[in-house]
Image (cartoon, rainbow, N blue to C red):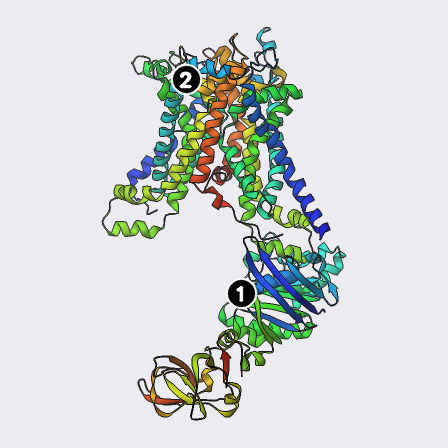
Amino acid sequence: MVQRNIAKYTTMAIMLLPAAIIIIVFLIAPSILTILISLTNLDYRFRWEWVGLSNYYRFLSDPNAPIFIRNTIIFVAGTLTFNVGVGLLLALLSTHIHDTIGTFLRAVWYMPRVLPSVVWAFVMMWMFSPMDTGFLNSLLKYMGGKPVPWTFQYYWPFLFIVNGFIGCSLGMVIFSSAIKSIPQELIMAAKVDGASGLTIVRRIILPLIKWQIAFVVAYQTLSLLASFEYILLTLDGGPGYYSTEVLILQAYHLAFGQYLAAMRFGYAAVFVTILLVVGLVLSIVYWKVFRLKELMIEPKLE
Amino acid sequence: MVKAKSLILNMVGLLVALIPLVPIGLLVALAFSESQVQPQGFTTKNFDFLKTGTLFANDPVYSKLYPNVYSVALNTFLLAVGNMLIVVLISSMAGYIISRYSFKGRSALLGSFLVIHGVPASVLLIALYYMLKSLGLLNTLLGVILVKVAVDTPLGVWVLKGFYDSIPWDIEIASLVDGASRLGAFRRIMLPLVAPGIFAVGLFSFLSGWGEYIFVYTFIQSSKNWTFSMLIQSLVGEMGGINLALIAALSMIYLVPVIILFVVGEKYLVRVTIGGIKG
Amino acid sequence: MVKVTLENVSKSFKGGVNAVKNLNLIINDKEFMVLLGPSGCGKTTTLLLIAGVYKPSSGYIYFDDKIVNDLEPKDRNIGMVFQSYALYPHMTIYDNIAFPLRLKKLPKDEIDRKVKQVASMLRIDNLLNRYPRQLSGGQQQRVALARAIVKEPSLFLMDEPLSNLDAKIRVEVRAELKRLQKELGITTIYVTHDQAEALSLADRIAVMNEGILQQVGSPDELYSRPANTFVASFIGAPAANIIDANIVEEKNAMYFEMLGTRFPMPRDYAEVLKNETKVYFMVRPEDVRIVEGKGFSVYSIEWLGREAFAHVKAPDGTLLRVILPPESKLTIGQEVGVNFNYAKTHVYKNTGELII
């Protein structure tokens, strides 16, 4: 009896431990470490000195803090709208046309997500460059118009587009699969009752995929709060003084930026800790709200 | 769905489908362009660096500033393959245990994987920098690989657990009765049956490592450890307004495995996205 | 060939589910034992306990005289057939059957010989290179059987192996299974919820309900002398009539007061039922006699070729199930009287156990 149990627990340990260890060491430990760092004034000297909550007070009195917060809200709201809106449109469109075209459409729109970020950022920056060498501008010049300062003036829409093309594919894929699993009979019954295409979408399809929409909104809000890769690669917080600098980007600049004021790990950690806490709280809320526990089925073997 | 036979809608669909291809097409055009900033004409001179791997071979100053393209390619490959092998190995094992064994804290463990997956890794960069420095793994590809593995594993475990869940219990019981030990059943029966899942997770983590930028940018300082993403971004910084065609050409080389793998495995990649999330 | 003994075996699962409660059962060597009962009665759990996939929460399981509670399934030398067949989808039929032999590390030519032998015994030798998904249900089931037989086990365990087959094939396969078992002489424990299947296949049947063993015996014993009302109503189709009855004594004569009227009690019943008041009276449809009389009326009648199946309405409204010879010329609404073949009827206590 004991022998059977020992064998069982050894197997479990060997197979589960590598994943557990690597996650604990490189994901859980750093989370705790981040909070600790925010309580120090760790910087380029790499000396560990506890300073209590002084970094947090500095944050509260930082004149730039409201700018970062405002930028974060604009960024998250705008990109989320693009993501969910375009995702829905693509899902609706691709499920109402010929299967082959629909599948092709979804495959192509999934591609930006797979591309390396630097390449996507490069192409977007070139296309929307405010200089004469930018693709859109050279096209405009060719047609006799004047160049437009795309990224100088319309930087938020630009960011929404750059991030949105990547983000909308999540919604597109989830919504398409949800729409496809709606029983055909419901749609046919509605048509027999005299509903037009648009009415069917509004009254039947959308209500039936409410859960999926809510889920995508919740999930992407969380990931957008701490998303900064494409902002870094394209506008790097500009143009000008912190026009598109979101919280997480400021944290990154403080810690790893090129300015002399960089490597201020202690202070940067404050920004990140705030985001971490918000992220954790939201995740746990989602866990409860979406009743994800029901995804678990008890195993049958022993 | 009741298909709209409407020709218009199908045309719209086709046009919409082509939109994301526009940037890619422009990139290709630029890579073969005779002009350095416009897509114009056709030439292959932008790809001259492929002969030796040295960029700016004719310029005595610039040619020393950048690492050899082939060594950069190797680094990128090592990062991608390293991530893929380790993630597949540990998530196929962990996914099996979580799917098939009952133990205290199983729900909590799975739940924590989901929570971890939801919080982006960008919040941990500062602490990770400090940790890697203390472990002596800063500026090494190994350090980057380990961090990448940690980030990709929760998703891998979730996806593979889903695949294991879909194998009927009867088959596993049959193999035990036939004389296999649990490990033998895992090796001979379960693993082959989750092969599509392993392929999907492997594909996903390879591409994830191949395209990685932030971790490389943050943790790696010396250019001999650069990957493609670093090389391209550094060129963008240096000559983003001048020699775009060269960057485009480099990008195309960088994209070749991505496009091939995407065409081969797009369905699997989509499954990973949904599998890690769908409720 | 092995004798299996279960001694006070109980099994409960997480969440407090008591699947098997204090089971005592002996399966004799070479016997075909059927575990019969409705869904959730614990029969599959019992089978998996014997297979070693589950461990008893308490009690002992013996193979011959050896306690096997802690023996791994792979060391128990059993062959198992599942309702879903559980064939390995990624292997050919040949590899499926050869699998247990390969695990035993037998030499290649011996494996080849045994596989081909079993395949021809079950007439699937032309399918060896195919994959499970290319086979019909009946063929898959024979492959599952082959895989169980090829390792020459001392015990067969079968979990509703015929449930997924078409009704017509099922009857044929049933006969073949019975013949095969007799030929191979391997102790067999067979789980099903189909009482007709149990009656036709079993040497003995163990009826279970809610984890508790109700009765063990030969098909005939269970049919003609059920130990409680559950077994009485579960075995036999159409189901037996189980009627609420009061025991009444009047002027030194005893009566069954049931169905809204009175039936005089035969002497042997009267002796045993003296002290009872409320009981259940059990009579099978074929033991109900339609006679000239009043009070009962024919509610419905179906002619089934070999016999006729009727519902007869009693004075208190109860519908009695009755089987009649095919020539009986009854009409709907016809008024009749009813009598019973008391040699075959039974009376049960209020709590369900048999009195007589």
Of residue C350 and residue A289, the one placed in the foreground of this image is C350
Dot label at residue A68: 2
Say whether residue B191 is visible.
yes
The residue at the point 62 percent across, 37 percent down is B90
Mark 1, residue position: C210
Q: Chain of mark 2?
A: A
Q: In this rendering, is residue A177 above or below C250?
A: above
Amino acid type at mark 1: Glu
- Whether labels 1 and 2 belong to a single chain: the reply is no
Q: Position of residue A8 (x, y in %)?
A: 68, 47
User: Few, some or many C-alpha atoms within 10 Å of disc 1 (few <14, some 14-19, many ≥20)?
Assistant: some
Spatial separation of the CA atoms under disc 1 and disc 2: 65 Å
Residue A216's image quarter?
top left
Q: Nearer the viewer, residue A212 or B114?
A: B114
- For the residue pair A229 and B28, the one nearer the viewer reads as A229
Name the element at disc 1.
Answer: loop
Residue A280 lies, in percent from the top left, at 48, 31
Q: Amino acid at mark 2?
A: Phe
* Chain hosting mark 1: C
Label number found at residue B221: none
- Foreground residue among A201 and B138: B138
The residue at the far left in this view is A194
Report the side of A182 relative to B77 (left or right).
left
* Left or right of residue C56, residue C106 in this image: right
